[in-house]
Image (tube, rainbow, N blue to C red):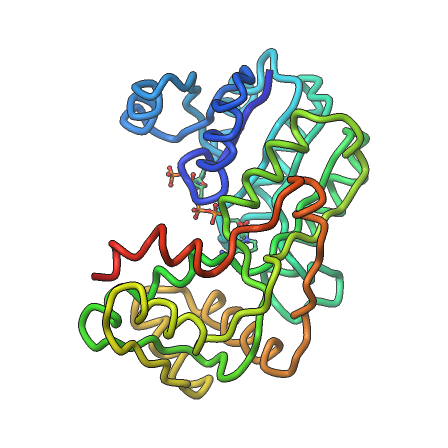
């Protein structure tokens, strides 16, 4: 039996959908009764637990062989994941598939890079067979522009002309589902990117063509981007990371395309136009 954490999120919901489509038995771990009921209605078996409550996690892990482990971006994410890995050890889990991020390393200048690294290290030394998935930035981040596209036909960011192999979170979930249900992935670390590099001008043009508006991309300086993010309620450390990531991409770092996702899925990765077509209704 597989346990899917983060099951209501962008990647976890795709894992749920993929496992359901192949008839693979699994349980989705959720934090509330309401979310459990919503999933139950679409035929998904659920268990209620919270990373901050170790006893609830131990119970959720009862009779579980494999785990899809995803923590939300948070200051204590490494600690929450380490606690969960400890619970997996206690209950005899045989494989953990963990969502990390591209560029994760001991020397990362980003908070998220450091925290994902701490989890990766803990997991690889836990003795539990593991697979680590390091996705690139999600196309779903483009949804943060819904308000400005609706109000001003504009998208803003500090990426300037950076070309980045954005990946659709649904493809990341599909890769995770394959890893959970096929042999041969234990001990592997997979970088998952989209199949093409995308600029902000590409995004603006694609959105404009699809919704029938002249959508423009306006580059903004790092400081203004940081201020806008914290103004929208993002914590300081996350705004630091997002601005830092954009600066890295502007400098051409961490922008390589990796074909691993396509190889695992046996099909091309979703393109930016696929993503825009599927989400255009949200922008108009
Ligand atoms: N965004 C990107 O571009 C990107 C790129 C590479 C890697 N990543 C990594 O991907 C992960 C985020 O994935 P995502 O975008 O799919 O996340 P998401 O959409 O933000 O969903 C987070 C999930 O975690 C659950 N959750 C939150 N707090 C929890 C807790 N205390 N206990 C149990 N579950 C909890 C949420 O449940 P509720 O519904 O109850 O809130 C939700 O299902 C992060 O580790 C991030 O660093 C992101």
Q: Between 133 and 168, which is closer to the camera in this rendering?
A: 168
Q: Quadrant of residue 200?
A: bottom left
Lateral position of residue 257 relative to residue 73, left or right: right
Percent across and percent down for residue 34 are: 27, 27
Q: Quadrant of the C terminus?
A: bottom left
Q: Quadrant of residue 204?
A: bottom left
Percent across and percent down for residue 105 are: 74, 60
Q: Residue furthest left?
A: 151
Lateral position of residue 31 relative to residue 237, left or right: left
Q: Quadrant of residue 31?
A: top left
Percent across and percent down for residue 189 are: 76, 46
Q: Between 54 and 203, which is closer to the camera in this rendering?
A: 203
Percent across and percent down for residue 48 are: 41, 23
Number of numbered discs: 0
At x 26% / y 78%, what residue is drawn? Answer: 214
Q: Is residue 282 above or below residue 15?
A: below
At x 45% / y 33%, what residue is drawn? Answer: 7
Q: Is residue 49 above or below residue 113?
A: above
Q: Between 68 and 197, which is closer to the camera in this rendering?
A: 197
Q: Quadrant of the N terminus?
A: top right
Q: Is residue 153 above or below residue 84?
A: below
Q: Residue furthest top?
A: 63
At x 40% / y 79%, what residue is drawn? Answer: 225
């Amino acid at each position: 039996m597989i346990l899917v954490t983060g099951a209501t999120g962008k990647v976890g919901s795709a894992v749920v959908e993929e496992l359901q489509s192949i008839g693979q038995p699994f349980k989705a771990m959720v934090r509330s009764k309401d979310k459990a009921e919503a999933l139950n209605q679409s035929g998904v078996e659920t268990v209620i637990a919270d990373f901050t409550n170790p006893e609830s996690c131990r119970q959720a892990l009862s009779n579980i062989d494999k785990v899809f482990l995803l923590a939300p971006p948070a200051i204590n994410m490494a600690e929450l994941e380490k606690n969960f890995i400890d619970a997996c050890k206690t209950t005899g889990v045989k494989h953990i598939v963990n969502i990390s991020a591209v560029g994760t390393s001991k020397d990362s200048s980003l908070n998220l890079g450091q925290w994902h690294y701490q989890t990766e290290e803990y997991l690889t030394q836990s003795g539990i067979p593991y697979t680590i998935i390091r996705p690139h930035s999600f196309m779903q981040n483009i949804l943060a522009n819904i308000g400005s596209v609706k109000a001003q036909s504009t998208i803003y960011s500090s990426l300037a002309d950076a070309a980045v192999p954005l990946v659709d979170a649904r493809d990341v979930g599909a890769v995770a589902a394959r890893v959970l249900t096929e042999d041969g992935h234990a001990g592997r670390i997979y970088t998952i990117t989209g199949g093409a590099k995308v600029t902000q001008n590409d995004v603006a043009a694609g959105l404009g063509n699809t919704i029938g508006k002249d959508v423009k991309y306006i580059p903004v300086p790092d400081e203004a981007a940081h201020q806008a993010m914290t103004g929208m309620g993002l914590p300081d450390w996350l705004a630091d990371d997002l601005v830092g990531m954009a600066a890295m991409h502007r400098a051409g770092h961490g922008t390589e395309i990796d074909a691993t996702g396509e190889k695992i899925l046996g099909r091309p990765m979703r393109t930016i136009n696929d993503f825009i077509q599927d989400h255009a209704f949200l922008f108009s």
